[in-house]
Image (cartoon, rainbow, N blue to C red):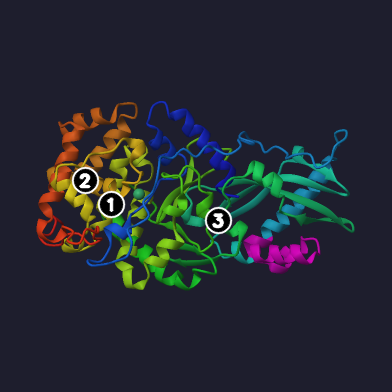
Amino acid sequence: MPTARADVRSRAAAGARTTARSTVRSAARTTGVALLVLALGACGGEPGDTSPPPTDPVAAPTTPAPAPATTAAPPTPGPEPTSGPPQVVPADVATTLQGVLDARATAVLTGDREGFRAGLAQDGDLLASEDRYFVSITQLPLTRFSYRLAPESLVRTGDGYWGVVEVTTRLGAFDQRAVHTLDRVRFARAGTRFVVDSTTDPAWEAAHLGLREPWETGTVTAVRAGGVLGVLDDGTAERGPELVAAVAAGVDDVSARVPYDWSRTVVFYALSDPAFLAGLDEVPGGDPQALDAVAFTVPVGPEAGDDAIASTRFALNRGALDRLGRRRSGDLARLVRHELTHVAVGAHDDEAPVWLSEGVAEWLSVQAIAPEDRRVPARTLAAARAGALRLPAEDAFNDEDAAEHYALAWWIVEWLVQARGEQGVWDLLDAFTDRPDEDDARVVRQVLNLPLAEVARRGADLMARTYAPAVAEPTDGAPPTGPAESSPPTGP
Ligand SMILES: [Zn+2]
């Protein structure tokens, strides 16, 4: 429920803003997917590592919004399950059904399994699937969980009713606001009362809901430590404590540098089931599975303003988790810091060009790494030495040369830190926030007194000068994954 319908609304809002900002920015930054990929196979490969290069993200985000469905509150009914004249639903029925939902919500909030089951039709399949849902959702730190039935949505079906409900959830301190989403529920008579007979209506869900939370579509295991909540599934649960600890350490690292006020709490998903990632829309490159991780926003929902966000979370791709096992915990930590930077920066980079938001995340992700261990792709380094590195167009940032673009963006920020100090990074981000309608190059020129191309050239030049040439050159024609490591980069 959570991201689903609200996502549609968010996309619509982003579309309206596209005129002022570039396509990628509006698509990638303001619609729910903050982006990103860290081409760890390249950036983090061990010297001499023979593993294949990373799967580069491809193409620009052009994923169209799904069927618009309902975009205005209040919730509207789904397709009529029966034809014929309109049926009038007595008001007291709506009140009764709301009572069924209230009892269900109370059972979830209090962990009352028997109470939850008592509100269900006594059907084996339904009881089994609802039991899995109960086990999953009651692991979450819910501080709000409620249903609001839309009486006008009720349609008679046999001696029962289908109705659209607005579901309100809030994951305690992890959400800055409650999240409102929709679902469709069927109620059946059971003697003198009503019970929930179905929570699944595939046709309606396909038409009205987008991305659904993993606890709505499968069984999850929640692991929490302090301000970090990990949502895992059967295939990843055993790594829960390790991942939560890595994220908690990342929160400390990122908090130490990002000057913006943020919650310092985060929810991350690490799922073996690809459904959640696959469901993300408008991911740069168009293929969420090609990304190692992605930060995404959870919209408040239909009743709030277009841009209202309940929280920013991130998801780790199963492929990245498999590749970055315990032997490569340092690379996993770097990936985590990259995504956490997006979470901590939040809306402060909504107006920034993608090279800056990604450059900041890349720069911050390596700060906890010893300078001599910070690697850049050898091919990128060669291009930097040849003076051939260029910033791509905004919508080409995540094309097949994404690894190169990320590295250049990182080194532009390194140059910025060297030239202006760390505060210079945040000042530049803030300049974009302050001037949302101005051309990117103009903002850069105003703040740094340099053309954007010159800033990129200086970043590339700093990269080239920082890494000694001797080690990085390929000797066998194959692109090495481990770049130079002598002459340490400038670091803290
Ligand atoms: Zn990123």
The answer to whether mark 3 and mark 1 are in CB contact below 8 A is: no
Amino acid tagged 2 = Val
> Is 196 left or right of 270, judged from the image as shown?
right
The numbered mark at residue 413 is: 2
Of callouts 1 and 2, the N-terminal one: 1
Residue 294 — which label? none
Front-most of residues 130 and 225: 130
Residues at marks 3 and 1, CA–CA distance in whole angstroms:
27 Å
Q: Can residue 421 be seen in this view?
A: no
The residue segment tinted magenta is 107-134
Residue marked by disc 3: 275
The answer to whether the residue labelled 1 contacts the one labelled 2, judged by CB atoms less than 8 Å apart, is yes
- Residue 213: x and y, percent? 56, 54
Q: Which residue is drawn at 75% across and 49% down?
A: 98
Q: Which amino acid does label 3 sit on?
A: Ala
Q: How crowded is mark 3: few (under 14 residues within 10 Å), some or many (20 or more)?
A: some
Residue 223 point in image, percent of width and height: 48, 67
Nearer-the-camera pick, 488 or 369: 488
Question: Badge 2: few (under 14), some or many (20 or more) residues near its Cα, within 10 Å?
Answer: many
User: Which mark is first along the chain, 3 or 2?
Assistant: 3
